[in-house]
Image (cartoon, rainbow, N blue to C red):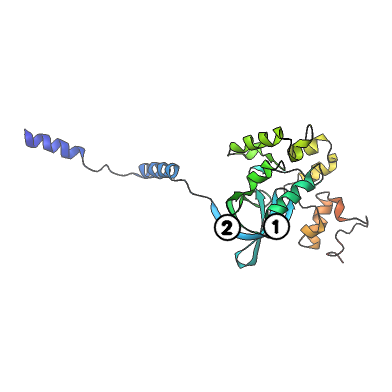
Amino acid sequence: MQDANLGKVAGLCRPVPTTGLSVLFLWLLLATVWPVSAVSIAGRVINVHDGDTVTLLVKNNRAIKVRLSQIDAPEIGQAYGHNAKRSLARLVAGKRIRLEQETSDRYGRTVGTLWQGDKNINREQIKLGMAWAYRQYLHDRSLLALEESARNRRTGLWSERNPTPPWQFGRRGGRTQASIHKSNHPACGRKRYCKDMGSCDEAKYYLKRCGVSGLDRDKDGVPCESLCR
């Protein structure tokens, strides 16, 4: 009888056959317990485009355009747009920084968090009142508290009574309906100046397809004469 009971116990301890489904389940379980961390890239900021976008020079002299994640700064054409750009420039321009890469957006920009030493630059822009917490892409809810604190202190853009968020700027008459339609074209990024253009063809595209009229200051139909001679 004792041997029979031992046999039953031994039977319970036999390894369970592993199927493809059980392997997949185990892999998914491990992925939730040990999430993959963001890719970290070191580089130097060589250009600040606006309050939430920079160009980073990384290894092998490769330049990548970076959109700061979870924040949205005022557009250059709206109130505090230039202030937000200058604020970001003071924080990172020409400095060695670390980028925690999260994803890429539809314009081909790398999206992530910038760190200068132990300072989170994305958070700094919100603390200084130079950007909103970007609700549509938010995954760190503490940024909302930083925004509320800046609003209560009437810091930066919050010195205005009712500042317009960038995602509502076009809808409130900041741009004409024609330019809104053009700039919403999937291939139109946030480039606005000749210095942002990589070629004459790109400048022509942004002038004609994206409605960036500032590229043709003399109104002769040719954008960025330095590129399109």
Q: Which mark is residue 93?
A: 1
Residue 35 rendering spot, x and y as whole percentages: 47, 46
Q: CA distance from mark 1 to mark 2?
A: 17 Å
Q: Is residue 106 visible?
A: yes
Badge 1 marks a residue whose secondary structure is loop
For badge 1, the amino acid type reads Ala
Is 50 above or below relative to 133?
Answer: below
Q: Which mark is residue 175?
A: none
The part of the image, by quadrant, that contains residue 41 is bottom right
User: Which quadrant: the C terminus?
Assistant: bottom right
User: Which quadrant: the N terminus?
Assistant: top left
Mark 1 in CB contact with mark 2 (< 8 angstroms): no
Question: Position of 169 compared to 99: left or right?
Answer: right
The part of the image, by quadrant, that contains residue 71 is top right
The residue at 7%/37% (across/down) is 3
Badge 2 marks a residue whose secondary structure is strand
Residue 185 rendering spot, x and y as whole percentages: 75, 46
Residue 205 rendering spot, x and y as whole percentages: 80, 55
Number of marks: 2
For badge 2, the amino acid type reads Ile
Q: Is residue 164 visible?
A: no
Q: Around disc 2, counting alpha carbons within 10 Å, would you say few (fewer than 14), some (14 to 19), or many (20 or more)? A: some
Q: Which residue is the site of mark 2? A: 41
> Considering only order in the chain, which callout, 2 or 1, is on the residue closer to the N terminus?
2
